[in-house]
Image (cartoon, coloured by chain):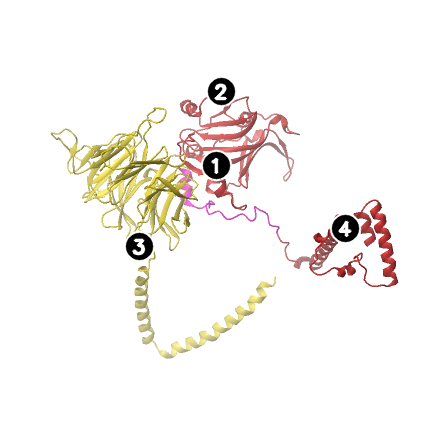
Amino acid sequence: MAKAGDKSSSSGKKSLKRKAAAEELQEAAGAGDGATENGVQPPKAAAFPPGFSISEIKNKQRRHLMFTRWKQQQRKEKLAAKKKLKKEREALGDKAPPKPVPKTIDNQRVYDETTVDPNDEEVAYDEATDEFASYFNKQTSPKILITTSDRPHGLSTVIPNSHVYYRRGLALKKIIPQCIARDFTDLIVINEDRKTPNGLILSHLPNGPTAHFKMSSVRLRKEIKRRGKDPTEHIPEIILNNFTTRLGHSIGRMFASLFPHNPQFIGRQVATFHNQRDYIFFRFHRYIFRSEKKVGIQELGPRFTLKLRSLQKGTFDSKYGEYEWVHKPREMDTSRRKFHL
Amino acid sequence: MAAAAARWNHVWVGTETGILKGVNLQRKQAANFTAGGQPRREEAVSALCWGTGGETQMLVGCADRTVKHFSTEDGIFQGQRHCPGGEGMFRGLAQADGTLITCVDSGILRVWHDKDKDTSSDPVRLPCPDGWGRWAGLLELRVGPGVCRMRQDPAHPHVVATGGKENALKIWDLQGSEEPVFRAKNVRNDWLDLRVPIWDQDIQFLPGSQKLVTCTGYHQVRVYDPASPQRRPVLETTYGEYPLTAMTLTPGGNSVIVGNTHGQLAEIDLRQGRLLGCLKGLAGSVRGLQCHPSKPLLASCGLDRVLRIHRIQNPRGLEHKVYLKSQLNCLLLSGRDNWEDEPQEPQEPNKVPLEDTETDELWASLEAAAKRKLSGLEQPQGALQTRRRKKKRPGSTSP
């Protein structure tokens, strides 16, 4: 046992030396001489003074050897414990206690007091009369202006009823009154830095909130591997996952108001906004139901990740506008288990 | 219960959905009060002030230009009056000697008689020789468009100050002439020789002197002294990069606490114009700030839908945080000294002993033997039950 361990840990000449040493020691042990200096076999490690740790050995190779030996021993013990536990569970059968659930950051999330209760009337009234009410009451349908300083973006194909215009350095505050005059309901500005998009400003138009996001992990349609054919003109369905808090609800409604009301299920296209740990993942897929329970999906469209930086009450006015929520890293990011969306 | 408890609420907050919320920090409860039973966005509360009789009555100014009377003792809305004239929301509400003073966005400042509370007053305009409209029992002043705040001097109830966007600070004496008593002058042109724009967002009168403090949308805090010959500000400091939206005086009287649109709160010393410290926690624009007159407590509310109570000194930090589901517009902090609501408890013991004496009499009238038998039966049964419970407990934990 120990010999095999030695062989695997050391290499070259040292292994031969160790093997020789081990053989000698084994003979000595076989002769029944009692305790040896180096604990080749575990029971003889009692030669070390108490309170001794492997890290105090000055010789690097010796120390490495001792450490690997200790590590293998730990691994063996762990494996043995696992096997034992498994046997016990099998023996108990149905009476076995349920497996303990591993702790994840999502499990350990600090309960947010602003989590929306579906039966809450006040929040329901607040949402029913907020700036998106006209969309959710089906009074207006979305018409979106997407602008970016450079080349067109794949986002225009994903969002129906969207028009792309080059920005050419125009000030947003001047674009906005023009958009309102031409009946646009939303404005999306993609901020780019050296040809890579890194920010998104989404402004709901008549006087609605403006959300500023940080965009990362952008994959354009041509960069996505194993994708399907181009998205068609059908209106996609929308999935909004995990927007639980009041702020999350506002942002979720904002995303929902970008798309027209009547998804065309013929097109079998779906846009997903999935919120996890305050990051919003956007994906665009085409699905097909192969049977009752099996679905095949093809990823079309661009994918990106958004993180909310601020939500402002009026239309875009970063200097004099009133903010409903601002992300303050030093105050809000102190706990790894607290999320805001 | 809610009505009886209403008087012990420490903070009253007005929201954008028209609900008036009373928060009791001792018992950590918040109660909603609406005039019509249902929240209505047209009734968004834009101004709050205490009414006559100390803190027993409150005046609530709503977005549909009605001023409602709310009784904090009973927890109900007692009446309302419609205050037409001008456009925009109420920017200031005050009451003095039985009159109601209102000021709206477009700059119409009016004084209303408090007598007709319940009827919507359509004042009759009497022709007046001096030309400016003096209505029967009412007073109207044109302050200038774009008013952001009208504040009443707590020491002189007939003196009010107004200020706004491109509307310089003016102090009006409602008993005097129709010209302002003090009209502030803009500061000198800046280093590029450009005119400095004016945007007074909040005004406070400093106690003990005639001075006023204003905070502006261009992140400046200015102190004006009408007693001095100069009409320009006596002191000017800046804080942050965002518009300051609310301001309040601290109990000492030497500093103010300001809040801006990013939720940053700062205490600024007025003697030197120095920043004393900041308060953390708010995530949205600060809409209402008020300090307690004697305790070092600050109540703040904003667009992030949370009411926070901070302690200003030793040590500086957050005391209470209450999530109130609507966006909060303005608040009123009760200035009373004792924050415990003990007087409520003597009411209940008064009722309970009465009932007890009645039941005791009933029992006394019944036969004593029956009572003993019943009590005898109950006890062993109770003991058995407890024993059963005890047996059950270890059993229940095993699976």
SS class of the residue under badge 4?
A: helix
Q: What residue type is disc 3 on?
A: Asp
Pointer 1 indicates a residue of which chain? A
Give the Cα separation between the discs numbered 1 and 2. 28 Å
Question: Badge 1: how crowded within 10 Å, few (<14), some, or many (20+)?
Answer: many
Q: What residue type is disc 2 on?
A: Arg
SS class of the residue under badge 2?
A: loop
Residue depicted at x 31% and y 51%: B294
Q: Hey, which quadrant is residue A325 in on the image?
A: top left
> Is label 1 or label 2 in front?
2
- Which chain is the one coloured yellow? B
Residue B337 marker: 3
Q: Where is residue B73 in the image (x, y as percent from the top left)?
A: 28, 53
- Give yes or no for residue A104 being in the magenta stretch: yes
Residue at the spot of label 2? A168
> Please, what is the dominant secondary structure of the magenta stretch?
loop
Residue at the spot of label 1? A251
User: Do the numbered discs 3 and 2 sit on residues whose CB atoms are within 8 Å?
Assistant: no
In-image side of B308 versus B177 (left or right): right
Q: What stretch is highlighted in magenta?
A: A101-128
> Is label 4 or label 3 in front?
4
- Which chain is the one coloured red? A
Q: What residue type is disc 1 on?
A: Ile
The N terminus of chain A, quarter of image:
bottom right
